[in-house]
Image (tube, rainbow, N blue to C red):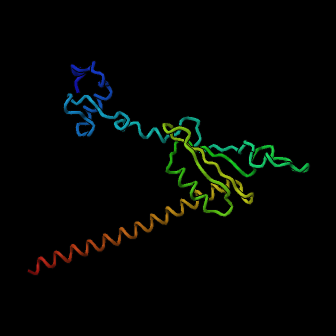
Amino acid sequence: MTDQLPDAVNAPCWSPRIGTLVAHEPNCGLRDNQKDNRHVSHKADYDAENRFELFLLDDGQSKVEWKEETRKSSLYEHLPKPPLTNPTPSGVPNTAVFTFNKEDHTLGNLLSQRLLKYDYIVFSAYKVPHPLFATFDLRVSTDGSITPKDAIIKCCRDIVGDLEMLKSSFQTEWLGKKIVSEGEAERMAREQNNF
């Protein structure tokens, strides 16, 4: 591309960066051929070179941060409290909030739904604080037989095991299909040579 920008540089939809990207990517589907290839319909879809940054951790940032739940449970506040019963000073017992950085709904839904299959999980849900940031909060409550952190670790190990089993099954089926298609091709070649 030449160092000179097109005549329509001052047009409201023109950006030198987008113009450079379009010039380097002549086959992109976001070019507007009506306006000298200078208009891209959706810039966020065209920022392909920076997409990986959504899932790379920043310096000093950890993948998972967790803290114990500090909110007080208001479920039983209206009932009279016996004199010997003291609420837990740390909030809801056996509950923690895990913040997963640089992850999205894919992992959040997978973890929260898998956790609900365990008998010792009382509550599991996630929320995305803001749709523009790749982070989610996973709240986990257990019955006390296991800590929320250990429940997450066990869940992750089980998911990895399931994915390994899925990969193995897929590869077996793919190999079987490949063998069948190769055998089918050989049979077709033999039939064509016989006639």
Pick whichever, 60 or 91, lies toward us. Answer: 91
Q: Which residue is painted at 45% across and 67% down in the image?
A: 168
Quadrant where the C terminus sits is bottom left
Report whether 27 appears left or right of 108.
left
Quarter location, residue 181: bottom left
- Quadrant containing the N terminus is top left
Query: x, y percentage for residue 142?
Result: 70, 56
x then y, percent, for residue 183:
25, 75
Give above or below for 39 relative to 193. above
Q: Residue furthest right?
A: 83
Q: How far from the left and from the top, in percent, is residue 179?
A: 30, 73
Q: Which residue does the image show at 19% across and 31% down from the upper left?
A: 34
Instruction: List the single residue furthest toward the bottom.
Output: 194
Residue 165 falls left or right of residue 66: left
Who's the residue at 31% across and 29% down the image?
Answer: 18
Residue under the image location 63 percent in, 46 percent down: 98
Between 50 and 151, the one nearer to me in the picture? 151
Q: Would you say 75 lies left or right of 42 here?
A: right
Q: Position of residue 57 (x, y in %)?
A: 53, 39
Q: How many marks?
A: 0
Compared to residue 87, the image places residue 33 above or below, namely above
Question: Is residue 105 left or right of 116 when viewed as pictured?
Answer: left
